[in-house]
Structures are given as structure tokens and as C-alpha cells.
């Protein structure tokens, strides 16, 4: 996915565009570009590489005069990262200029048609189809041309558009890719996400699907696809601006790991009232909770790993059957969703295309959908029947940490609520769980303060080629997340395995010195896990164990052990993940990787 910005007002546009793009680089950073219009000429600068290349080329925007402009930072989908594929894209005579986040699914068909009409294409992108299609329909009325292409394009788009013969107007339109607009002092601004506008305004309009915005320096008008004016209300964003900055940490990822105790507490405390769990946003009566016969959890990446953990927690604690799917599979497998099935969509960004599509598939089949989302007002939040926010605050690092931890806790709260309402746990068990849950933030803090020990251990594995993470039950789920954290920030290959499964093939990869991280926090599985650890160590593996304080037995089979404080068996994932996050982070730092913006990735994958 990509990030778009646009500005129209009484200030120079280029510096504002560059500043906005710098807050959106987490959305994609393989190339960037801006176009600025001074009323005479539309000047464009775009280049492969990070945003700083563009800032250098334009001397921080000072070489591009004009008070109207659009900008783009790219995560390539169609066409490799290059100057010519970078946005903005323009029509032949340069009278229309466009930036785009999303994918035009039917671009090849449209491209063929436009070529047959004599249009020439310079780039390999799907976006260039948009600007030539606008040119094809344009007869001097921007709104009309925009609605015409909306009827022809399939797929997702958030567009910023400049029409040369409308030098005092900026247009934007959205379908399935996020778009917000805001008033600034002396102008108006559009962006893909809130961090890009926070410096200028806290009152933000979330653009809904197939809504068009027409902006001048001091007006903002909204229209629907039938060109009818519509009314919209702004939403007040009360994020702390620093929250979107590094605050003295070397990387956002480290900062966000250290924000986990507060984020977890912020997610728990508003939902604990007089010793009870109160989740008003669930929108379900006790009868409706009792009537749930199955829960289907759908998500991607780390959020999917939370789903796997939640299967063990919900089935173990609340005795409800749970199915977990990756969203990209769920959306195409024509899932069977019976009555009394609750579908839960887990998503940090609330904009992941596959998860949004899965939500719509579930709703089309009549299911009630609960969104568990971090970004307020995001598409998944708005399209869910009910939404339970994880109060992690803005998460900028591509590799999720605090939002993941808050999702785990949100699901624990949900499981406890369901277990209590359905009468499958005793009052004493429930009270003990509440006590354990409230201790989690401090226990996470304790583990984070262990970072030097982890860093020292990580530095021994900077050259590792293959790392295995193994576990059973919820520890298998945490192994998945530990493995993904390592892979996505350090580029070291890694796999997570159900510990009992390793011997059915993959153990053939274990050789002298292979690092195997064994997670064993489930007392009833200690013995099984220790035998799996012996299996790999006898084949030469170096075994890192993550286990509960007091389980000294494990040291017989482990070469290096990290202990986590005792907690309820269902909550151990919230603690065991901390050393694994730190491990992946310090390996990446040691290998000189770009921790916050790993290669090939983007923070929220708003395309398929
Ligand atoms: C996690 O570190 C990754 N960045 C990625 O797997 C992420 O969890 C996945 O893309 C889902 O994102 P979402 O939670 O915003 O939907």
C-alpha cells in the first residue's frame, strides 16, 4: 500500500507535502514524488528511493513554488520501484495529475481500451490508467469526470487529483483505501492517515467509500457518486502528537515495545468495573453471549497469531468451538457460517484489504461481526457491527508489538467475559484471573528491563541462517509470532512448529549449531516439551528456552533459559512474547537492518 497527501491553501505546498509524506513513509517507501501548481505551471519531482532523496532533490520543497500540490510515497504493486513508476502520474499534456493508493483491478482491460483510443503509457503502473481515463472523460467538469471513472474502475483507490484548468481546486475520492481530509489554518489537507495531518488539525473527516471531496483554500465540499452534495461531520482526534514521534528511542519498534505496559493497562482498565469485566462496545446481551455456538476469528499476520492463541484461550476457558482463518483464505473459500456464529476480525490498522474483504464476506453471509481494531474510525472499525478498540495508540513501526499485545489482552477479556456469563468458570477462578490480568503490565515492564541480557544473546546469532521456534498449545501460537518478528525485521529465515510435529520431517534441517527457541509455559506440557528439546539438541541444536519461573527442570535440556513471571496459564503469551520481540529487534539492529521500515513490507497492506 502507499501514502498520499494533498494541500491547497495560502502557504507553499511542497514543504507541507514532504512533511505529510514523512509521517506516511511507514505505508511504503520504495519511491516518492510531489507535484506543485503555482497557477501557471504544474511542476513535478519524483524519484526511486526513500523520501529523503526527494527532499534533497527539491531542497526540502523550496525549489517548487505553488500553494496547491499532491504527493505520494510508494509500496510497489504494479511496476518495479523506479522514477517513471513513482507517482504522481499525468496525462499527455500534463493538464491532469494524480496520486493513488490502492489497486485498479481491471487496469489491463482499461489500458487496452485507452491504447486503442491512442493513449500512450510511460509507466507499468495501474495508476496511469486513472489519469488517462480522467483525460478521456474530461470536458471541463472535474466532478463529472471523477464520477465517470468511478463507474469504470474496479478495485481500490484513494486519489488526489489536480486539474490544470482549475488552479484553485483540489479533488480527492476514495473506495476501499483510507482517505482523510482536514481544515488547516489557511488551507485544506488530504492524507491516507491521521499522523500526516495531526500537525495541522485534530478535526478530521473520514471519507467513506465512493465519496468525493472538492477543496479550495477555504472551502470543503463532499459529494456522492451521483454528484449530489452530502453533509459530513469531523471526528476529533485526541492522539498526543508526540505519540507519533520516536520520543528519544532509537527506533519506533523499541519505543512501542516499551509502551506495552501502558497500552495493555489502557486496554484492560476501562473494561474492569468493581471486579467485573464490562465490554459495552461488544453490543451483546448475556442471552446473546450464551447463544453463541461458534466463534470464527479472521485476520492476517501477527493478528492471525493472536487468533491462534485465542482459539486455545476461548476453547479452554469458555468452552466455545473456535475456527481461525487467515483472511486471504477465508475470503475465497466460501466459508460455511451457521447461525449463532460470532465472527471476529482482528486488525491493528483496520485497513488490511484481506481482512476488510473477509468482514464483508462474513456480513454477506449474515454473520454478526465484531471488529477488534487499533485505529479509531478505520474501515474495519466502521464496517463491523460492533468494535472493541485496543487502546495501544498510534503504532508506526511496521513490525507490530504493542498492538499485538493489546489484541491478546482484548481477547483474554472477551474469553473471561464469555466464560463467566456462560458459567463455565467459578467466581474464585474468575477473581484469580482478574488479579493475574492486572499484574500483566508490571510483569511486561519487568521483562522489558531484561533487554541487555537478550541483546547479548542476540548478538551471538547475527549470522544465523535458520531459526526454529517450537511450542505446544498457546506456546505454539507464540512461537509463530516470535518467528515472524525475527523474519520481518532481521531477514533471517525462521519457522514456527508445533513441537510434536517437528519430527515428522522438518527436524532433518536441524544441524550443529541450529538455534531452536522452545517456548514452554504450559505446566501440563513441560515433559513433552523437554523431550522435544532433547530431540533437537541431540542433533546439534542450540536450545533457547522461554519458560515460567520455577521450572528449573528445563535447564537440563536447554542451553540458555529466559524465565517469565508466573501468571494464569492462558495469559502467558503476553509475557513470553516480550523476550522474543526483543530478540528479533536486537538481531535486526545488530545486522544493520532498517528496523522500522523493513524491506518489501508496509505497515498496513491495503491491497491484495
Ligand atoms: C506484523 O508485524 C506485520 N506487520 C503484519 O503481519 C501485520 O500483522 C498484518 O499485516 C496485519 O495487519 P493489521 O493488524 O493492520 O490488519
Image: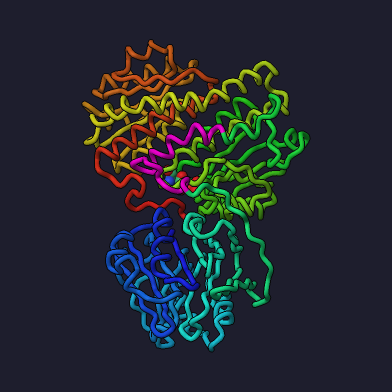
Q: Is residue 169 above or below residue 46?
A: below
Instruction: Tell me which residue sits at (53%, 65%) in the image.
Output: 185
Q: How many marks?
A: 0
As drawn, 370 above or below 140:
above
Name the residue at 28% across, 27% down.
457
Q: Residue furthest right?
A: 287
Q: Quadrant of the N terminus?
A: bottom left
Front-lying residue, 165 or 548: 165
- Which secondary structure class fits the magenta region best? helix
Q: Position of residue 533 (x, y in %)?
A: 34, 20
Residue drawn at (37%, 14%) of the image: 554
Colour basis: rainbow
Q: Tell me if residue 443 comes above or below residue 210 in the rendering.
A: above
496 in the magenta segment? no
Report x, y in % for residue 45.
33, 72
Residue 14 falls in image quadrant? bottom left
Q: Say whether residue 500 is visible.
A: no
Is residue 210 visible in this depiction of the protein? yes
In the rendered view, would you say 87 is above or below 508? below
Q: Position of residue 282 (x, y in %)?
A: 69, 40
Task: Tell me the magenta residue range.
Answer: 242-265
Q: Position of residue 81 (x, y in %)?
A: 31, 63
Q: Quadrant of residue 44?
A: bottom left
Looking at the rendering, which quadrant does residue 25 occupy? bottom left
Please state if 486 lies on the left or on the right of 219 as rendered: left
In the image, is residue 251 part of the stretch drawn in magenta?
A: yes
Amino acid at each position: 500500500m502507499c501514502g498520499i497527501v494533498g494541500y491547497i491553501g495560502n502557504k507553499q505546498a511542497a514543504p507541507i507535502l514532504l512533511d505529510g509524506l514523512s509521517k506516511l513513509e511507514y505505508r511504503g517507501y520504495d519511491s516518492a514524488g510531489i507535484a506543485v501548481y503555482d497557477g501557471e505551471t504544474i511542476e513535478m519531482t519524483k524519484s526511486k528511493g526513500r523520501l529523503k532523496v526527494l527532499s534533497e532533490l527539491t531542497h526540502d520543497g523550496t525549489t517548487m513554488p505553488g500553494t496547491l500540490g499532491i504527493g505520494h510515497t510508494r509500496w510497489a504493486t504494479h511496476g518495479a520501484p523506479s522514477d517513471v513508476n513513482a507517482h504522481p502520474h499525468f496525462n499527455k499534456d500534463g493538464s491532469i495529475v494524480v496520486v493513488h493508493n490502492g489497486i485498479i483491478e481491471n487496469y489491463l482491460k482499461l489500458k487496452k481500451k485507452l491504447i486503442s483510443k491512442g493513449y500512450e503509457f510511460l509507466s507499468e503502473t495501474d495508476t496511469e490508467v486513472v489519469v488517462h481515463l480522467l483525460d478521456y472523460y474530461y470536458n471541463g467538469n472535474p466532478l463529472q469526470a471523477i464520477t465517470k471513472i468511478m463507474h469504470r474502475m474496479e478495485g481500490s483507490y484513494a486519489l488526489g487529483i489536480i486539474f490544470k484548468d482549475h488552479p484553485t481546486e483540489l479533488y480527492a475520492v476514495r473506495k476501499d483505501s483510507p482517505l482523510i481530509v482536514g481544515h488547516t489554518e489557511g488551507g485544506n489537507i488530504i492524507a491516507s492517515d491521521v499522523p500526516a495531518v495531526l500537525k495541522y488539525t485534530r478535526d478530521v473527516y473520514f471519507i467513506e467509500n465512493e465519496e468525493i471531496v472538492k477543496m479550495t483554500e477555504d472551502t470543503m465540499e463532499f459529494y456522492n457518486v451521483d454528484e449530489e452534495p452530502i453533509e459530513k461531520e469531523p471526528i476529533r482526534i485526541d492522539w498526543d502528537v508526540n505519540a507519533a514521534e520516536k520520543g528519544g528511542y532509537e527506533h519506533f519498534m523499541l519505543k512501542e515495545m516499551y509502551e506495552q505496559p501502558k497500552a495493555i493497562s489502557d486496554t484492560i482498565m476501562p473494561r474492569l468495573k468493581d471486579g467485573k469485566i464490562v465490554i459495552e462496545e461488544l453490543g451483546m446481551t448475556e442471552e446473546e453471549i450464551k447463544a453463541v455456538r461458534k466463534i470464527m476469528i479472521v485476520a492476517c499476520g501477527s493478528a492471525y497469531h493472536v487468533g491462534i492463541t485465542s482459539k486455545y484461550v476461548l476453547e479452554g476457558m469458555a468452552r466455545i468451538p473456535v475456527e481461525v482463518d487467515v483472511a486471504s483464505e477465508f475470503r475465497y473459500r466460501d466459508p460455511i457460517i451457521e447461525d449463532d456464529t460470532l465472527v471476529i476480525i482482528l486488525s491493528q490498522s483496520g485497513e488490511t484489504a484481506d481482512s476488510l474483504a473477509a468482514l464483508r464476506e462474513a456480513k454477506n453471509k449474515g454473520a454478526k461481526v465484531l471488529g477488534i481494531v487499533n485505529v479509531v474510525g478505520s474501515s474495519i472499525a466502521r464496517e463491523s457491527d460492533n468494535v472493541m478498540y485496543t487502546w495501544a495508540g498510534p503504532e508506526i513501526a511496521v513490525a507490530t508489538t504493542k498492538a499485538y499485545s493489546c489484541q491478546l489482552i482484548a481477547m483474554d477479556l472477551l474469553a473471561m467475559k464469555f466464560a463467566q456469563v456462560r458459567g463455565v468458570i467459578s467466581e474464585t477462578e474468575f477473581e484469580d484471573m482478574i488479579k493475574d490480568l492486572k499484574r500483566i503490565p508490571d510483569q511486561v515492564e519487568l521483562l522489558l528491563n531484561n533487554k541487555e541480557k537478550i541483546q547479548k544473546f542476540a548478538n551471538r546469532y547475527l549470522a544465523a541462517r535458520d531459526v526454529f521456534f517450537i511450542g505446544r498449545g498457546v506456546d505454539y501460537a507464540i512461537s509463530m509470532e516470535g518467528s515472524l518478528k525475527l523474519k520481518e525485521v532481521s531477514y533471517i529465515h525462521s519457522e514456527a512448529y508445533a513441537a510434536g510435529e517437528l519430527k515428522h520431517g522438518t527436524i532433518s534441517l536441524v544441524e550443529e549449531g541450529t538455534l531452536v527457541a522452545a517456548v514452554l509455559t504450559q505446566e501440563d506440557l513441560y515433559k513433552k516439551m523437554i523431550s522435544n528439546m532433547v530431540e533437537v539438541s541431540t542433533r546439534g541444536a542450540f536450545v533457547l528456552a522461554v519458560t515460567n519461573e520455577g521450572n528449573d527442570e528445563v535447564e537440563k535440556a536447554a542451553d540458555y533459559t529466559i524465565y517469565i513471571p508466573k501468571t494464569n496459564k492462558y495469559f502467558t503469551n503476553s509475557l513470553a512474547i516480550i523476550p522474543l520481540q526483543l530478540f528479533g529487534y536486537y538481531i535486526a539492529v545488530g545486522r544493520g537492518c532498517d528496523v522500522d521500515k523493513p524491506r518489501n513490507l508496509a505497515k498496513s497492506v491495503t491491497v491484495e
